[in-house]
């Protein structure tokens, strides 16, 4: 991927146009079918039975009461479930062993004719187990905290440079466990047709699901079809195959009929991943003019025994963010007997940037500098971690453009000085960044002899607008309108493609679609523009296009601005205004891009003020499992909010010149909000979320009210 | 699960007498949550939706007879003048969809300390009318809550209606939460002024095992308003009086630490709500000349 | 237990069509619509009345149908998202959601649309909300935000939802007048 020249997509309509979603009509009329909306004839229903303890062994599964339920078909457990092959993911080895790795792990599965019967059966299954004391608490002294390979980096002499710095910030920040909670709980409808397994799954990437199911059930991949035509959000929770789809396939095998399994909302935190809690120490050493000489970011987090290689890579953004000759990053992770953490929107970046961008705000206060000027002063020429140039950056431009739009120039930096009645008002800023990566993908383009085109790729539209933007890329490449082609996505029967995740979906799929359509155009030209009777079909793969050495750091950047009001009597904080200004290459569809960036920012707002979960040390799981106790932002929590982007040209990315935007919107938002709370109240929020009780206590302790 | 559908109140009482473990259900917004959570697995439900009188209200000379299943949305629309405190609280119950189905009977049956309708019922003064085949009795609402999610109903009894004192003065309700909507209160407070009898009523939510009144605070405020002649003069309530009132409200609370807030914070916030609602009701009292013209 | 005690015969009128069903007493209206009538527009997001994805109109009022037992809906008139459009022309709220890009993944959208239809009717009838001030007919973004807060959207399409519902207000009133 060295190339600075791409066979670029012609820039212009329909690419870059606000084309309405091609699946919009299906979604507003309710005709779009999600995984649980398929009910094959004879479909049975399954309901999971969660482990009642955090660690131990199942010693008996009492099925009699459950099987007495009218319509009962089966209770599967480790002692009778079909044996599975190895899919290299221990969370998928369901019902294979009596060992309990975490509370909420599925230890039995009830299958019945109807949903109410399955649910009643699951409640009637009695699990006997021999519990052993679990290890649940992460502390900086935890004996099993280790630094995995590649989890630390060092340049220069951080300790000496920090010690010698004129201004030092040394602070610890914490983020609680956070839950993805896409609106669609994970669901799968599975059926065996002859020797084939056909599954409707809510997944961000059905090729990985097919591969896993093939390995587990010891089938060839082409004996498995996975359909994820419409997916009700994921935010990382559906980024890898999850246990529900294996359970559904297993149950369908056991009862020899189709089985539908929709996870109850309350089991999502235990079974589909979450953002693990992080304890983050950030140290910044600077001169009095705000030039950072030394920067260190150290993170402690945890994983589960089922996901030994997982960690929240929260120091990753810090490596490439600001210039400083003396640098240190380290991530430590301890295996705890807890549900497996996994991806949640902007894994790593979202957590890490809260800490670093809070620390930068603290440094601005300590140096009596404007926080935007502080960031501009520490802008690196090249990626400080790798020494490579950035393919494009424009962070400072985002900050300055945002400052103009937000009215930052009039801001008095003194904290706790703006009062409206019983409210304190403040504003804050933070940077955002996320890697712009590309993964190999294949795609197929077909020209019909009678006119019209078909583009096929197993991309997934989890709400990003992938269907629409890929049609735009194809149409632009072919020089036609979006309505002159059909786009088919969301099935493993289509050409293999990577998941919708890591902000690399559109870039990866789009590259393959562009390549296929470009080659198809050439083939049509070879036929003097006349498509032969059998049509023309081109199938491509971008593996080789991406295989060359990389000379650039590719990241998207942005600036987040927030205005908050804090009630001096109750400590309730509310966000009045949010503004995001981003540099993400070419924006391929401003309509869907704007929606996605707004959505990320609102999830960040929610992270700042309302979202919190607890790892309960008495039970080993999260008590805040439902949407009444885990507060995601509601419509009434979002007031004035706006998104803008720079016209960024970057020819070193991909043929579209685009960067992913799925995660960029959430990164830095929480820090912008808590920095604004500091400006409003003088209280520095280092532990998310900024809840009324802690905020009020701090305001009282500081004598601010 | 058996589903009993009595056609009228007499049949409902007979069904409850025959199936004391059966759970009554009307709007479903309290009971169904517990069933869907797996917290309850009743053998039988008694569907009260066919009993028209449970969804009716009647305004009398001094009290409003509010059927147990009158949905919150109708309390808001139809009784804002007679039951202003309850109408304000009803605005913050769950979501609009919940408010279209749920009623006071469900909140009383569930007896959760966080139920939004409890503070205004306590503040206004109310009696819960419960019935069984053995007869009917009225329970003062403050005696209705007997413990965390426990109430004074006998196994064969059903809640028929609530007799709530008609507002004769301003009433307010306020709560603290992290989200702007669909929020379970960190703490809640209801306050009612009764100029006719020169008394005040209070109701506290989410700060004790059960919803409670702050009796000492009520008596203190009544006395302070009387002694300073404020009922007649409509003068400003001295900050010291408001402060002492808030302190006594807090003294009636017995909060716990939980994820939504510490006990200390709940006490502090409760004092804030007590002072705020006192400000609001007293401003309204002074502005509207409630009952003062003839004093 | 006698299985006759565990089931009930119900008559439902859904989107104008009468269905006579014998159902497990434990069935919720949401499960009946989805699993028995194949009306999968209403979605299960939480099963606890905490998200609004299952919002439908029962006798003209928006409700969370995950909290309704089907047997208790005997004789009710139910409108789901599938009943808002005639298959070709869309309801004004649906058109406005398309025009404003008021959704992303689309999972909560049928519930949002039904909720908006209910909310606009409540506003047109002058029913106050927690943020209504004075006696003017409720309107404007603050009213819509408050009234749409029973429908969570994790993609957070809220700003566009508020605009869409605002756009649809006038035309939705006409729709109600046309629809008995």
Image: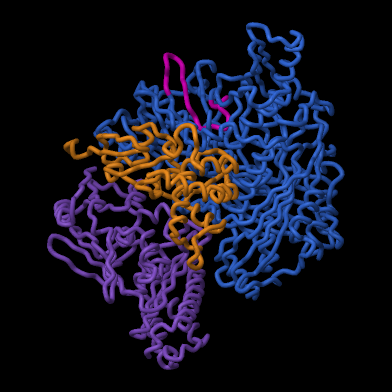
Chain colours: A blue, B purple, C orange
Q: Which residues are magenta?
A: A191-209
In the rendered structure, does residue C13 fall within the stretch colored magenta? Answer: no
* Quarter where residue C55 is shown: top left
Is residue B135 rendered to the left or right of residue A577? left
Out of B193 and A333, give the one closest to the viewer.
B193
* Quarter where residue A569 is shown: bottom right
Q: Residue at x 36, y 36 (%)?
A: C33
Is residue A353 rendered to the left or right of residue A409? left
Q: Residue at x 50, y 64 (%)?
A: C136
Q: Residue at x 78, y 27 (%)?
A: A10
Is there any visible trace of residue A342 in the rendered image? no
Q: Position of residue A246 (x, y in %)?
A: 46, 28
* Quarter where residue C35 is shown: top left
Q: Position of residue A500 (x, y in %)?
A: 61, 33
Q: Position of residue A342 (x, y in %)?
A: 57, 40
Q: Residue at x 49, y 89 (%)?
A: B235
As drawn, A37 above or below B286: above
Quarter containing the C terminus of chain A? bottom right
Out of A677 and B85, give the one closest to the viewer.
B85
Q: Position of residue A91 (x, y in %)?
A: 51, 33
Out of C145 and A311, give the one closest to the viewer.
C145
As drawn, A511 above or below B22: above
Is there any visible trace of residue B253 in the rendered image? yes
């Amino acid at each position: 991927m060295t190339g600075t020249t791409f066979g670029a997509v012609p820039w212009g309509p329909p690419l870059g146009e606000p084309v309405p979603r091609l699946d919009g009509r299906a979604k507003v009329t309710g005709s779009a079918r999600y995984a649980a909306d398929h009910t094959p004839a004879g479909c049975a229903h399954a309901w999971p039975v969660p482990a009642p303890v955090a660690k131990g062994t199942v010693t008996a599964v009492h099925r009699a009461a459950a099987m007495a339920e009218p319509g009962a078909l089966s209770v599967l457990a480790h002692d009778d479930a079909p044996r599975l092959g190895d899919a290299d993911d221990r969370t998928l080895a369901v019902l294979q062993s009596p060992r309990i790795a975490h509370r909420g792990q599925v230890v039995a599965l009830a299958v019945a004719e109807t949903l109410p019967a399955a649910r009643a059966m699951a409640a009637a299954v009695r699990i006997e187990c021999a519990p052993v004391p679990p290890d649940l608490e992460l502390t900086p002294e935890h004996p099993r905290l280790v630094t995995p390979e590649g989890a630390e980096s060092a340049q220069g002499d951080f300790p000496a440079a920090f010690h010698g710095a004129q201004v030092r910030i040394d602070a610890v920040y914490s983020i609680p466990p956070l839950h993805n909670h896409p609106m669609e709980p994970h669901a799968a409808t599975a059926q065996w047709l002859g020797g084939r397994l056909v599954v409707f799954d809510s997944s961000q990437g059905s090729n990985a699901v097919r591969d896993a199911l093939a390995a587990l059930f010891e089938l060839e991949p082409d004996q498995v079809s996975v359909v994820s035509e419409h997916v009700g959000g994921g935010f990382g929770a559906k980024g890898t195959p999850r246990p529900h789809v294996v359970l559904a396939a297993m149950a369908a095998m056991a009862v020899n009929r189709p089985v539908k399994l929709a996870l109850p909302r309350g089991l999502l935190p235990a079974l589909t991943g979450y953002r693990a809690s992080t304890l983050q120490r950030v140290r910044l050493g600077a001169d009095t003019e705000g030039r950072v000489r030394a920067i260190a970011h150290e993170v402690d987090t945890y994983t589960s025994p089922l996901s030994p290689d997982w960690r929240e890579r929260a120091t990753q953004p810090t490596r490439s963010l600001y210039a400083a000759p003396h640098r240190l990053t380290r991530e430590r992770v301890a295996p705890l007997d807890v549900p497996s953490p996994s991806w949640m929107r902007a894994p790593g970046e979202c957590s890490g940037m809260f800490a670093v961008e809070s620390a930068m705000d603290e440094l601005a206060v300590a140096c009596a500098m404007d926080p935007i000027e502080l960031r501009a002063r520490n802008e690196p020429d090249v990626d400080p971690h790798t020494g490579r140039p950035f393919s494009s950056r424009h962070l400072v431009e985002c900050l300055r453009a945002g400052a103009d739009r937000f009215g930052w120039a009039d801001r008095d930096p003194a904290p706790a000085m703006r009062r409206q009645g019983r409210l304190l008002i403040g504003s804050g800023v933070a940077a955002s960044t996320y890697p712009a990566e590309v993964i190999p993908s294949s795609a197929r383009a077909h020209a019909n002899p009678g006119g019209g085109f078909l583009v096929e790729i197993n991309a997934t539209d989890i709400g990003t607008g992938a269907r629409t933007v890929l049609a735009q890329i194809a149409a632009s490449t072919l020089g036609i309108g979006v309505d002159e082609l059909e786009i088919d996505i969301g099935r493993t029967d289509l050409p293999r493609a990577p998941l919708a995740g890591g902000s690399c979906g559109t870039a990866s799929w789009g590259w393959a679609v562009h390549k296929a359509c470009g080659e198809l155009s050439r083939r049509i030209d070879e036929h003097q523009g006349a498509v032969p009777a059998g049509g023309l079909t081109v199938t491509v793969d971008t593996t080789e296009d991406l295989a060359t050495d990389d000379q650039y750091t590719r990241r998207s950047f942005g600036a987040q601005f927030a205005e908050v009001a804090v009630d001096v009597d109750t400590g309730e904080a509310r966000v009045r205004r949010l503004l995001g200004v981003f540099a993400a290459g070419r924006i391929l569809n401003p309509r869907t891009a704007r929606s996605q960036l707004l959505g990320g920012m609102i999830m960040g707002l929610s992270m700042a003020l309302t979202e919190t979960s607890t790892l309960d040390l008495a039970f080993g799981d999260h008590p805040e499992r439902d949407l009444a106790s885990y507060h995601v932002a509601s419509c009434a929590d979002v007031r004035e909010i706006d998104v803008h982007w720079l016209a960024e040209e970057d020819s070193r990315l991909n043929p579209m010149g685009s960067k992913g935007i799925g995660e960029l919107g959430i990164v830095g938002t929480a820090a912008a909000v808590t920095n604004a709370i500091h400006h409003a109240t003088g209280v520095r929020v280092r532990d998310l979320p900024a809840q009324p009780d802690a905020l009020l206590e701090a305001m009282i302790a500081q004598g601010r009210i | 699960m058996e589903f009993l559908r009595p056609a009228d109140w007499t049949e409902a009482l007979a069904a409850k007498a025959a199936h004391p473990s059966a759970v009554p259900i009307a709007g479903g917004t309290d009971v169904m949550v517990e069933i869907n959570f797996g917290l309850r697995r009743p053998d039988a439900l008694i569907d009260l939706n066919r009993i028209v009188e449970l969804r009716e209200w009647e305004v009398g000379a001094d009290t409003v007879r509010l059927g147990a299943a009158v949905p919150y949305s109708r309390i808001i629309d139809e009784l804002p003048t007679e039951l202003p405190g309850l109408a304000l609280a009803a605005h913050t119950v769950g979501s609009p969809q919940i408010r279209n189905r749920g009623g006071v009977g469900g909140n009383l049956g569930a007896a959760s300390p966080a139920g939004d309708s409890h503070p205004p019922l306590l503040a206004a003064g109310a009696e819960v009318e419960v019935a069984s085949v053995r007869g009917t009795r009225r329970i003062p609402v403050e005696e209705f809550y007997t413990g965390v999610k426990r109430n004074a109903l006998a196994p064969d009894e059903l809640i028929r209606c609530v007799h709530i004192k008609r507002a004769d003065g301003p009433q307010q309700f306020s709560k603290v939460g992290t989200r702007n909507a669909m929020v379970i209160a960190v703490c809640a407070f209801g306050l009612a002024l009764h100029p006719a009898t020169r008394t005040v009523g209070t109701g506290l939510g989410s700060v004790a095992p059960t919803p409670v009144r702050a009796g000492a605070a009520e008596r203190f405020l009544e006395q302070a308003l009387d002694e300073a002649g404020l009922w007649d003069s409509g003068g400003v309530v001295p900050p010291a009086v408001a402060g002492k009132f808030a302190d006594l409200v807090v003294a009636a609370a017995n909060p716990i630490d939980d994820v939504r807030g510490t006990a200390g914070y709940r006490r502090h916030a409760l004092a804030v709500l007590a002072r705020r609602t006192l400000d609001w009701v007293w401003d309204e009292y002074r502005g509207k000349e409630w009952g003062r013209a003839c004093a | 237990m006698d299985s006759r005690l565990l089931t009930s015969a119900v008559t439902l009128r859904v989107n104008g069509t009468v269905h006579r069903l014998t159902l497990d007493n434990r069935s919720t209206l949401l499960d009946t619509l989805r699993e028995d009538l194949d009306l999968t527009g209403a979605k299960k997001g939480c099963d606890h009345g905490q998200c609004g994805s299952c919002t439908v109109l029962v006798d003209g009022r928006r409700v969370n149908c995950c909290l309704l037992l089907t047997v208790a809906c005997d004789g009710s008139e139910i409108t789901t998202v599938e009943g808002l459009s005639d298959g070709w022309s869309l309801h004004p709220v649906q058109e406005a959601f398309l025009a404003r890009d008021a959704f992303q993944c689309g999972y909560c959208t049928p519930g949002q649309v039904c909720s908006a239809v209910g909310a606009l009717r409540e506003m047109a009838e002058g029913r106050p909300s927690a943020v209504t001030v004075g006696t003017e007919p409720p309107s404007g973004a603050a009213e819509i935000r408050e009234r749409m807060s029973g429908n969570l959207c994790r993609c957070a399409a809220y700003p566009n939802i508020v605009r869409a519902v605002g756009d649809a207000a006038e035309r939705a009133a006409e729709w109600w007048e046309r629809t008995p």
